[in-house]
Image: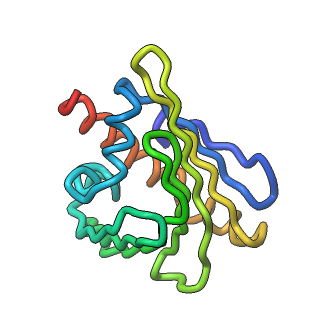
Amino acid sequence: MAENLTVTTPSDLEIKMVRVFDAPRALVFAAHSSCEHVKHWWGRGNPLDCEMDFRPGGGYRFVEHAPDGEWAFRGEYREIEEPERIVQTFEFEGMPGQICVETLELTEESGKTTVTSVTRFDTKEQRDGMIASGMSEGAGQSYDALASYLAKLN
């Protein structure tokens, strides 16, 4: 796991991840809102096929081309409040029908942006299964790639 990522389980149905980025909130939000940016960091920085319709009711689909295989994910944007909040569903296509809801909150202080992500599952078993799958490590690697990408843009 990346050392700058904090992962906790605030309830039996949730996983919370917190990471601070050395970049303004508008830039961090932009990095989440278009394929132009997302393909540089999501999926641990591996090559990524990206489709996005970034609006409430719109959707996304990412296919990560990793050394250990191809991994596809999709979801729907439920709420978007630029530049501070994104609520979206998340589904790993390898486990269809297990859909969780992610809420990202972005706050800025002194030019640094804290991203707080809370993922809510339907059951404790789904939450624990996601933890056991290596979600924290993958998210940490993606956030490391995001930090590197933001440093190039900032």
Q: Nearer the viewer, residue 35 or 11?
A: 35
Q: Name the residue at the right extreme.
A: 12
- Residue at (54%, 68%) from the top-left corner? 89
- Taking the image as shown, residue 78 lies to the left or right of residue 15, namely left
- Taking the image as shown, residue 149 lies to the left or right of residue 26, namely left
Q: Name the residue at the bottom extreme.
A: 96
Q: Name the residue at the top extreme.
A: 110
Q: Position of residue 34 (x, y in %)?
A: 28, 56
Residue 50 higher or lower than 144, as above or below: below
Asked where in the image residue 47 lies, by quadrant, the reply is bottom left
Q: Position of residue 70 (x, y in %)?
A: 31, 75
- Residue at (44%, 14%) from the top-left corner? 110
- Residue at (65%, 68%) from the top-left corner? 129
Q: Nearer the viewer, residue 13 or 85?
A: 85
- Taking the image as shown, residue 105 lies to the left or right of residue 57, namely right
- Residue at (36%, 27%) from the top-left corner? 24
Q: Nearer the viewer, residue 55 or 128?
A: 55
Q: Position of residue 141 (x, y in %)?
A: 39, 47
